[in-house]
Structures are given as C-alpha cells and as structure tokens.
Image: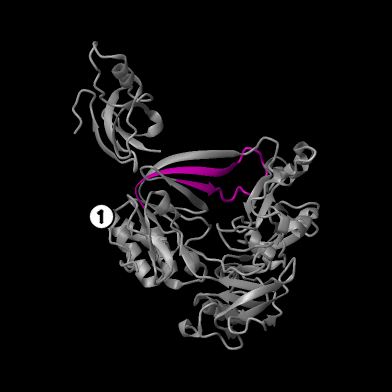
Amino acid sequence: MMQLNCPWCGVRDEPEFVCGGTAQIARPGVACGDQEWGEYLFFRENPKGLHRERWRHTYGCGQWFNLVRNTITHEIIAVYGMQERPP
Amino acid sequence: MSGRRLPAPSGTRLDRTREIRFTFNNRAYSGFHGDTLASALLANGVQLVGRSVKLHRPRGIYSCGVEEPTGLVDVGSGSRRTPNVRASLLEIHPGLVATSVNCWPSVGFDVAAINNWFSAILPAGFYYKTFKWPNWHVYEPSIRRLAGFGRASTEPDPDRYEEIAISADVLVIGAGVTGVAAAVGAARGGAEVLLLGGSSHLGGRLGYQGDAPTAALIKEAQQLGIRILTRTLAFGVYDHNLVCARQVIDGVISQDSPGMLRERLWKIRARAVIAATGAFERPMVFPDNDRPGVMLAGAVEKYAHAYGVACGSRVVIAANSDQAYQVAATLRGLGVEVLAIADRRPDTLIAAEAPQGTQRFSDAMVSGVSGHRAVRGCSIATSQSETKATHFDCDLILSAGGFAPAVHFHSQAGGKLRWLDQSAMFVPDGAAGELYSVGACAGVFELDAALSHAAAVGTALGRRSAVPAAPIPVQTA
C-alpha cells in the first residue's frame, strides 16, 4: 500500500485516493479524424518507469492533483497541481 | 520414543514449577510453562506427528521455528478449531487439544499410506484426471477427500481479532541479538524505535543460551524506552515501508470465554526499516531424509538449550559445515551420545575437530536411513568406498548444512541479491529503498562484526546520516 502526499491534506494512505489515469493528455482539435479521436479517448501508454498520473483524494478533501510516479519502485517523484506544468 | 527432558540449567525458557497438561491425538501429555507443542512432544518421546500430503509418509518435527515444514497440527475443537498450526510456534497452555493432520484413522496407522507403495506411478506433477475410465466423477470424491491438509471449523469464530495501523520512526524486525543491538543504536541516535520479535523472548540464540552481554543489551533496550512487541511475527513489507505483523495475544490464549481478543494485526508505516531476521539452516539431502528423527542441527541445539529437550540419545550428523562440530560438542556436553559425523567435504577443507568418541568421516554422506516411523539407524558411505557403508544404530540424524540468510524482506522490498562465493550464499546487495539488513540476514555471521554493524546502522538511521554497508566482501567471484 502506497502513501501519497495530498497537497491539501498531507501524507495519507493509498485507500483514501482514487487514481484517474494518465495526466494532462492533450485533446485534439474538433477537426481531427476518428482515428485520432479514438486514440485520444482510449489509448494510453503503459510505461515501465516514470508515469504522470492524476489522483483524487476522494475519501478526504476530494481535490484532484497530479503526480509523477515510478511504476517499478512506486517511488513518488513529484506532486503538483492540476494547472501546473510537470517538473 | 527417544526424546527426553534434560536437567536444569538446560531449558532456559521453561518454568519447571508450572506443569501444563495437554492432549495430542487423544492422549494426555504434560509439559512445562514455556514449552512449545513441538518441544513438549519431543520431550515426551513423540516423534511421529503427521503425514506427508500425497504419499502419506510418516513425518516428525524437523525444525524449531517459523521454517517448520512438517510439524503441522490442528489445534482446538469446535468453533475454535484452527488448522495447520506449526507445532514449533505454538506455546502450550492448559487444556490444549491438538491433532495430527492429513491422516485417517490415526497418525500411527494411516490407510492412505498405501499411496507410498505406488509412489513410482504417482510422480510429482501426476495428473489425477488420468482416472477417467469410465468417468472422472466416479473417482473424484475420494481423490478430493485426500487433498489438502488440516480441517477448518465450519462454525463461526467466537473470538475477536483487531487491527492497528501505526507509524514508526525506525522499525526493527527480529529481536535476536543483532536486532536488539540495532534498536539500541537507533534509540541512542535519537529515533523512536519499535522492535518486533516473533517469539516470547528477546535475544534469540544467545538469549536462550543465557549469554550475559545479551541480557545487558536487552535491559538497555528496555531502559531506553524502545517499544517492544513480542509474539509478533512480521509477515510482509509493502510499498513505502509498510510492514504487516501478526501478534498472538499473550495470557488470553487459555481462556475459554467467547469474544476474547486472540490476535492483532499490526500495519506499521515506518520511516526506515531494519531487517534483522537471521538465517535459516539449509537441509542436507540424502535418501529418506524426511523420516521422523531427522532434524536440523541448530534446531536440536535450540531444543536442548531453550526447552531442555534431548531430541534423541544416539546421534549421527550429516554435515557440510563446521557448525556440525560445534553442535556435536554441545550435545556431548549435555550427555547425548554423538556417534558419527558424515562430512561431505574432503579432509583438507575441514578445520574443526570432532569431539572425543565421535567418528568423523570425510568426503562422506548418509547413504541410507533405516526405520519407517522413526529413525532406527543409518549408513554412512564415503566416496572412496561406495560399496561398504558403515552402519550406525542411531535414533536421531542431524542435518548441518550451513546457513542461508533470511533475505525475504529485502527481496520483497525490491532489493537485489548477490552471490558470495566464499560463504556460498546469496546476500542482500546494498539496501532495498529504506530497508536495511543487518546481522545474519545480511550475510554477517561474525558476532562482533554483526553487533557493531547493526548498532552503526541503527545510530545512522536515528541521526539521519549515511548508513554504513555490511562488513562482507564486496567483490563477487
């Protein structure tokens, strides 16, 4: 069980959070084709290593935030806000 | 029927003034306060305690700790029946009822032992659905009945179990002497320390041998305000240094009122973890080495020191390490006859001397074991004289195969291992995140080196400074 550092509440155990998948995916324009739109909706990277992802402190403050996690060691490299650029 | 109780001062964990009566396989036995079921049975001369899972071969107590593979029993009755408890971990209490698992009608006469006659056509990985003529479902009920070990209770459990989640600054797993040294070091370095010990006592091997410096170290740990949990066996380390441990509640074990607290699950989140889990003995391989009466050498030594039990009276040791000679000397000192040591190594590699009256065979191994439900004798063959083996009438065969560091926590935490050629073992390669191994589980078997390394690791973690590496050779061969 991991420990995540909520920017508002501090360090809490993983069951309080819900993972929202890959963070900050650029949405294609309205004029894009079906292929591109489908990839935007359904296709995700599954990296072995650093991964940017969204988390929500559902059973706490309810706020969303982003973090960078190493998917091998589960080391949390950085926690940053929804509107901030990844470090 | 060869085990017996040794006089004091052997049996440092026993309180011989408090006799405890218990039942095993519907027969009454007695032991002392402090005995485990395994030690009490061995002291009563009970060797046959169970049956193997498939061929129903007779099995006895093999070890003296968490590694026990064969001494499994069902404990309690009715709604409190607990299956497959390791006899080597279960402390006896008045009114304890234990039964052998995996045998019918009794462990001595087991109908399914007939399987052993067909062992040649029931190899490992045998596919039972081969029984398909005329229909698998004809055979299924009887084959299913043979599967599995103990029987669980079908009634609801009347007792209470609780769960505690806490955080710790420095957590030490293992309360052997290195674990205590690491805890003391960390406390001195300014950390808040939690120490987990699997058994009821601290100090491990040196503790039950009555070693004075160890007793002083334990006293210091208590004075420093280290939080100590005994009978608390850590069973896993998870992400971000979460350690889970199971505590068996002392004192209430013997009560019968429903709703009592039996066990507690600890979920401990630690800044840093020190693993001081020691090492497991490696078993020697020879024909019929699963007979009741074949045991680990270190376990037999522990039964003698801590529980005052001589597991046999005429001993042969199968060895490939110098540990055998030290165990032989200990057993001799306690009045147990050690007939022979069969050392796998050639003469030139053996540094230790066999004690007086013990025959030493070099470049030799146990080539056969006689006796079915208990060891009656064994033969030793040397590689020079394969044809004429020497026979010994013995009732106990010890296996002194050296040690393997208990690196499980290190590995579970994601740490890598490396091979040490000099000592022929895998040791942790550095730390696993914030989990540091000390003592025998880090491959450090020299007592002074282990103690000073453990204390240094503890102090460094307390002071949040750089943690020193284990004092073992860095170069792999």
Query: In this view of the protein, which residue sits in the foreground, B460 or B112?
Result: B112
Q: Is residue A2 above or below residue B229?
A: above
Residue B264 shown in magenta: yes
Q: Position of residue B450 (x, y in %)?
A: 37, 67
Q: Position of residue B209 (x, y in %)?
A: 51, 71
Q: Is residue B325 above or below residue B299?
A: below
Residue drawn where x is 43% and y is 52% of the image:
B409
Q: Quadrant of the C terminus of chain B?
A: bottom left
Three-letter code, disc 1: Arg
- The chain carrying label 1 is B
- Main secondary structure type of the part rendered in magenta: strand
Q: Position of residue B210 (x, y in %)?
A: 50, 71
Query: In this view of the protein, which residue sits in the foreground, B333 or B411?
Result: B411
Q: Is residue B31 above or below residue B157?
A: below
Q: Quadrant of the N terminus of chain B?
A: bottom right
Query: In this view of the protein, which residue sits in the foreground, B42 or B343?
Result: B343
Residue drawn where x is 63% and y is 77% of the image:
B316
Residue drawn where x is 53% and y is 66% of the image:
B282
Q: Position of residue B2 (x, y in %)?
A: 72, 72
Query: In this view of the protein, which residue sits in the foreground, B338 or A25?
Result: A25
Residue placed under numbered mark 1 in the picture: B463
Asked whether residue B18 is in view, the answer is no
Residue B208 shown in magenta: no
Give the extent of the magenta segment: B244-273
Residue drawn where x is 27% and y is 58% of the image:
B467
**For residue B245, side relative to residue B41 (left or right):** left
